Amino acid sequence: MKRRIAALLLALLATQLGSLISPAYACGCGAMIPEGYARIGVERETSVVGFDGRTEQIVMRFVVRGDAPRAAWIMPVPGRATVELGDAEMFRQLTWLTRPEFKTRSYFWPRDQDWPFSSTTGDSAGAALPGAAPPVGVVGREQLGDFDVARLTATDPDALRNWLETNGFKLPDGLAAELKPYVDQKWEYVAVRLAPRQQGKTLMGTLDPLKIRFDSDRLVYPMRLSRLAKTPQSLGLYILADHRMEPASAIGGARPKVTFAGEVTPEGGLAALTGGKPAFLTAIDQEFPEPGRIDGDHELRATAADTPYRKVIYHGELLTLGGIPAWLLTVAAVLVALAAAAFTLRRRRSRTAGA
């Protein structure tokens, strides 16, 4: 069944789609286009953003499924970009850094899984790219793993259509119009041709992460192209900066939710995004039930205070004293007290009657 692709964030970070989609485009921060009638689906897209006030770095990783031997992906950027392979280890580190805190919360009265309501048989298991012609200019080209990366300038959105068609891809309807605001702002593009070097191999599974770096005096995450998606989208975004960050607006989506905020000391590839210095990490999730309402790109700003936040997951535990449920001891004590009171009352009545 053919469906439009919807991907992201964040999350980041991340987004997930389990079905195969074709034609596929409108990833959270760019456009992915399969060759011909091939299918490609983005099951998950995670983005990590590093920003020091002058330079922005975005590391993206796609988990894809489909039968496409080739695909093209376009991402608009506000300045001249450099592209290199990212470090996959940083995503595992982010999962660890933003893990929830687990706490035990005691409760007094027994619940379904506790005696005398528990079942003895119960189971609690849960569930280049050659051929480009003006007005597109190729300012750089690199072969990075399975990626053939071109860095482009464009003065006309239709030029991107021509470039794609020259390289065997068809620009989806409406994408050229959505690219025009970036052209008007003199943004440039990172255009990636995803083509495994191994003959006969299709784009499947986890792709190598790409690291994109460009100068910027503001932290911006391109989202406008996501408005072309036909299914709801999710954005997951990790942000490493000097302070806790927040989107300036919801840009047509649901209210962004912070899933983690706190100062961290990155290591390995993640440290390269902060220059080896501690940074404030903010993890944001956002839902876009109606992608067509997206009206711009995310601009992120520092919050008024660097308030830390970590999700807490509580595990309920029946309150016990010496291994005996507290409720049972309490009920027993009340029964004993009532029995003693009744006994005392009967003795008094007996003495009064015999007097």
Image (tube, rainbow, N blue to C red):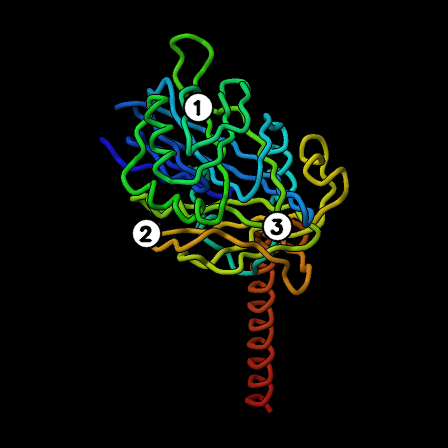
Mark 3 vs mark 1: which is more N-terminal?
1
Residue 304 location (% of width, % of height): 65, 65
Q: Is residue 14 left or right of residue 232?
A: right
Image quarter of the C terminus:
bottom right
The one of 92 and 271 positioned closer to us in this rendering: 271
Q: What residue type is labelled 2?
A: Gly
Q: In this view, does 92 lie to the left or right of 279?
A: left
User: Up-down: is 77 above or below 340?
Assistant: above
Q: Residue at coordinates 42% horizontally, 46% vertically from top-left?
A: 234
Q: Are marks 3 and 1 in contact (CB under 8 Å)?
A: no
Residue 112 location (% of width, % of height): 44, 51
Category of crowding for the residue at label 1, using alpha-carbon neighbours closer than 10 angstroms: few (below 14), some (14–19), many (at least 20) = many
Mark 2 vs mark 3: which is more N-terminal?
3
The one of 209 and 156 positioned closer to us in this rendering: 156
Category of crowding for the residue at label 3, using alpha-carbon neighbours closer than 10 angstroms: few (below 14), some (14–19), many (at least 20) = many
Element at label 3? strand
Disc on res. 282? 3
Element at label 2? helix
- The mark closer to the camera, 3 or 1, is 1
The one of 134 and 101 positioned closer to us in this rendering: 134
Residue 104 location (% of width, % of height): 62, 51
Category of crowding for the residue at label 2, using alpha-carbon neighbours closer than 10 angstroms: few (below 14), some (14–19), many (at least 20) = some
The residue to which callout 1 is attached is: 193
Image quarter of the N terminus:
top left
Disc on res. 292? 2
Q: What residue type is labelled 1?
A: Arg
Mark 2 vs mark 1: which is more N-terminal?
1
Q: Residue at coordinates 33% horizontally, 45% vertically from top-left?
A: 177
